[in-house]
């Protein structure tokens, strides 16, 4: 098997820096996750809470809008008392 | 109306799995919206996203919707997606079911035109004397239209290659692929008092093919 001689392909400081960057960033990410996990956790909790608030807001809107729509549907139907039922 | 049995089935389903129940309920709402779209001739444009159906119905003629229905359906659709795709409490899922059942009742109660087959498989002729042979590639179907008030507004004969049965409630759909349609045609109308006597009537000058489906198949 052919051995790759790094010094034969990495000529400049920039080449070495690029290699280091490519290899090192996953380790940096792991360290960052380990170091800042509590901050990340609280951010995720906040996202979940915001989503929960979204659901609450949706239900609040439905609580408000459905009775209005039901009244309107009743009014429209009252205008047309002899309507055949759906499917007939 | 939403039948007590359907509501009961959904609630029984919810006891085992609220998510399955809400998925089934959404399918039923979708089916009712399809029926409404079919009655207005807009079914082919519907892609299956509930709020989009209301958009199509708002632009359709001959149908009046509660103003809040679009908003309500949009909110329900988003809640349904949340219930189906996230881990939610049983309480939330049951509330979503309640909203869905109320929306279904509303959609079912919307007044709409209806179309009923009066006579099917009527031989039609290319000549005004109705001399045989009848057209081989098409038959006539006589459709009676009922207004949203349930009053008959008249009947018409249309060309169709589909089989129909008298009494069937059908959707308002046309085959736009067959732009050629059929030219002037005539048919024989039996005398209601004496079936042996027939009157020749004009069927159509030109017409697309009627391809309405039985509403139960939508």
Image: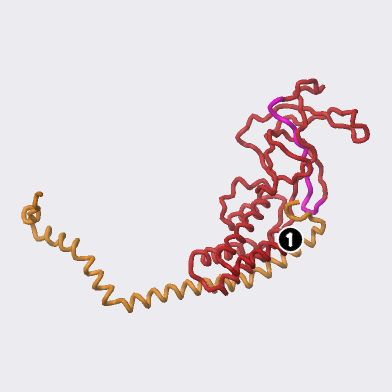
Height in image: B98 above or below B174?
A: below
Residue under pointer 1: B1
Left of B128 or right of it: where is B6? left
**Is residue B121 visible in the rendered structure shown here?**
yes
Q: Nearer the viewer, residue A21 or B62?
A: A21
Q: How is the image coloured?
A: by chain
Height in image: A44 above or below B123?
A: below
Residue B66: x %, y % from top left: 69, 62
Could you say which quadrant of the image residue B106 lies in?
A: bottom right
Height in image: B181 above or below B167?
A: above
Residue B78 included in the magenta stretch of the image: no
Residue A77: x %, y % from top left: 77, 61
**Is residue B58 visible in the rendered structure shown here?**
no
Give the residue drawn at x 74%, y 46%: B169
Q: Nearer the viewer, residue B115 or A78?
A: B115
SS at mark 1 in the image? loop
Q: Residues within 10 Å of mark 1 (few under 14, many from 20)?
A: few
Magenta part of the chain: B136-150
Left of B3 or right of it: where is A5? left
Q: Quadrant of the N terminus of chain B?
A: bottom right
Q: Nearer the viewer, residue B26 or A58?
A: B26
Output the letter for the chain in orange: A
Which shade of the palette goes to chain B? red
Residue B23: x %, y % from top left: 57, 61
Q: Chain of mark 1?
A: B
Give the residue drawn at x 25%, y 70%: A30
Left of A57 or right of it: where is B133? right
């Amino acid at each position: 098997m052919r051995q790759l001689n790094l010094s034969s392909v990495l000529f400049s400081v920039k080449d070495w820096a690029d290699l280091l960057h490519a290899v090192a960033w996953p380790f940096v990410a792991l360290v960052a996750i380990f170091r800042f996990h509590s901050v990340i956790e609280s951010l995720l909790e906040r996202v979940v809470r915001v989503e929960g608030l979204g659901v609450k807001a949706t239900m609040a809107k439905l609580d408000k809008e459905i009775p209005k729509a039901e009244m309107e549907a009743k009014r429209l139907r009252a205008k047309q008392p002899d309507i055949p039922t759906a499917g007939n | 109306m939403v039948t007590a049995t359907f509501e009961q089935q959904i609630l029984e389903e919810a006891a085992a799995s609220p998510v399955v129940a809400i998925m089934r309920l959404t399918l039923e709402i979708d089916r009712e919206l399809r029926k409404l779209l079919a009655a207005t001739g807009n079914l082919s444009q519907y892609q299956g996203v509930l709020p989009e159906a209301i958009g199509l119905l708002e632009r359709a003629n001959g149908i009046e919707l509660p103003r809040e229905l679009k908003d309500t359906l949009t909110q329900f659709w988003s809640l349904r997606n949340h219930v189906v795709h996230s881990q939610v409490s049983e309480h939330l899922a049951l509330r979503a079911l309640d909203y869905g059942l109320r929306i279904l009742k509303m959609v079912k109660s919307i007044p709409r035109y209806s179309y009923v087959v009066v006579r099917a498989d009527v031989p039609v002729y290319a000549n005004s004397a109705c001399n045989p042979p009848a057209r081989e590639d098409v038959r006539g179907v006589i459709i009676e239209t009922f207004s949203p008030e349930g009053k008959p507004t008249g009947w018409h004969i249309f060309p169709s290659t589909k089989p129909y049965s008298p009494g069937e409630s059908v959707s308002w759909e046309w085959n736009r692929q067959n732009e050629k349609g059929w030219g002037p045609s005539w048919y024989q109308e039996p005398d209601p008092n004496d079936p042996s006597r027939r009157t020749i009537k004009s069927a159509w000058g030109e017409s697309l093919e009627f391809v309405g489906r039985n509403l139960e198949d939508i």
